[in-house]
Amino acid sequence: MRDLLTAFALVFVIEGCLYALFPEGMKRAAVRATILPAQTLRIVGLAAACAGVALVWVVRH
């Protein structure tokens, strides 16, 4: 549970840094995301989740 909470905290740190350093870029990215079809976002999200799981597995083993 501690690792899960640490992971969430790191997501907040990274996302916060992106918004602080590139606010206009993040706004443009959000607008572009609303234009994409839901299926495309779903596939990209699933691919990102799989890549994240693979990266955690490589780092932890």
Image (cartoon, rainbow, N blue to C red):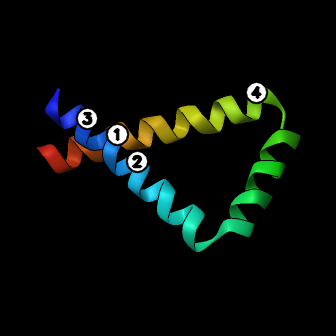
Q: Separation of disc 3 and disc 2 at Cα?
A: 10 Å
Q: Separation of disc 1 and disc 4 at Cα?
A: 25 Å
Q: Earlier in the sequence, mark 3 or mark 2?
A: 3
Q: Is residue 43 left or right of residue 16?
A: right
Q: Amino acid at mark 2?
A: Val
In depth, the one of 57 and 8 nearer the eye is 8
As drawn, which residue projects farthest toward the right?
A: 35
Q: Separation of disc 4 and disc 3 at Cα?
A: 29 Å
Tell me if residue 55 comes above or below residue 4 in the rendering: below
* Contact? badges 1 and 3 (CB < 8 Å): yes
Tell me if residue 19 comes above or below residue 9 in the rendering: below
Q: Amino acid at mark 3?
A: Leu
Q: Which secondary structure lies at badge 1?
A: helix
Badge 3: few (under 14), some or many (20 or more) residues near its Cα, within 10 Å? few
Residue, x 33% and y 50% (percent of image)? 10
Badge 2: few (under 14), some or many (20 or more) residues near its Cα, within 10 Å? few
Q: Separation of disc 1 and disc 2 at Cα?
A: 5 Å
In this orientation, does residue 19 appear?
yes
| Quadrant of image for the N terminus | top left
In the image, residue 29 lies at what x, y percent? Answer: 74, 56
Residue assigned mark 4: 39
Residue assigned mark 2: 11
In this orientation, does residue 54 appear?
no
Q: Nearer the viewer, mark 1 or mark 4?
A: 1
User: Which disc number belongs to residue 5?
Assistant: 3
Residue, x 70% and y 35% (percent of image)? 41
Q: Which secondary structure lies at badge 2?
A: helix
* Contact? badges 2 and 4 (CB < 8 Å): no
Tell me if residue 16 comes above or below residue 36 in the rendering: below
Residue assigned mark 1: 8
Residue, x 43% and y 58% (percent of image)? 14
